[in-house]
Amino acid sequence: MFPAANATLIGSIGVGLLLLAFFLNLFGLLRANGYPYIALNLAGGALACLSSWMIDFMPFVVLEGTWALVATIALARKLVTGSAGSGAGVEG
């Protein structure tokens, strides 16, 4: 359907963003309820979902799509209430 190289590049960027958010949070550099953490999860999940869809691998479309949806809900909640849950670390 799509060139595998494009899907690989998009997926790699998406997974890289997810891992970046995870490690920055783990080392106390981003708070789990901060905009940067939520944005990295939303962008990473969406790109990984797109990549999985491009290679027609539905289990990861569901996984990454859910990841992006949950991040979207967290972002919307934070925009409306100013709170997206608890987290640790420094606001990034």
Image: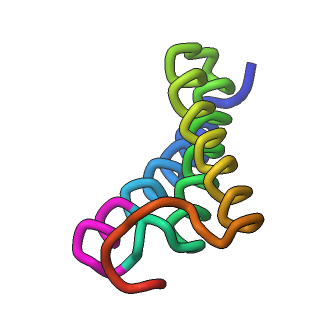
In-front residue for pair 74/40: 74
- How many callouts does the rendering have? 0
Look at the image and say whether residue 23 sits in the magenta stretch: yes
The residue depicted at 45 percent of the width and 84 percent of the height is: 91
The residue depicted at 31 percent of the width and 73 percent of the height is: 88
Residue 6 visible, this angle? no
Q: Which of the 4 image quarters holds residue 67?
A: top right
Is residue 8 toward the left or the right of residue 72 in the image? left
Q: Which residues are magenta?
A: 22-29
Check the image and report above or below for 17 versus 62: below
Look at the image and say whether residue 83 sits in the magenta stretch: no
Q: Which of the 4 image quarters holds residue 11?
A: top right
- Residue 6: horizontal and vertical position, in percent? 64, 41
Name, please, the residue furthest toward the front.
81
Q: In the picture, which quadrant includes the N terminus?
A: top right
In-front residue for pair 84/65: 84
The residue depicted at 29 percent of the width and 65 percent of the height is: 23
Magenta part, dominant SS: helix
- Residue 31: horizontal and vertical position, in percent? 41, 73
- Residue 45: horizontal and vertical position, in percent? 57, 44
Check the image and report above or below for 77 versus 66: below
Residue 51 visible, this angle? yes
Is residue 88 toward the left or the right of residue 86 in the image? left
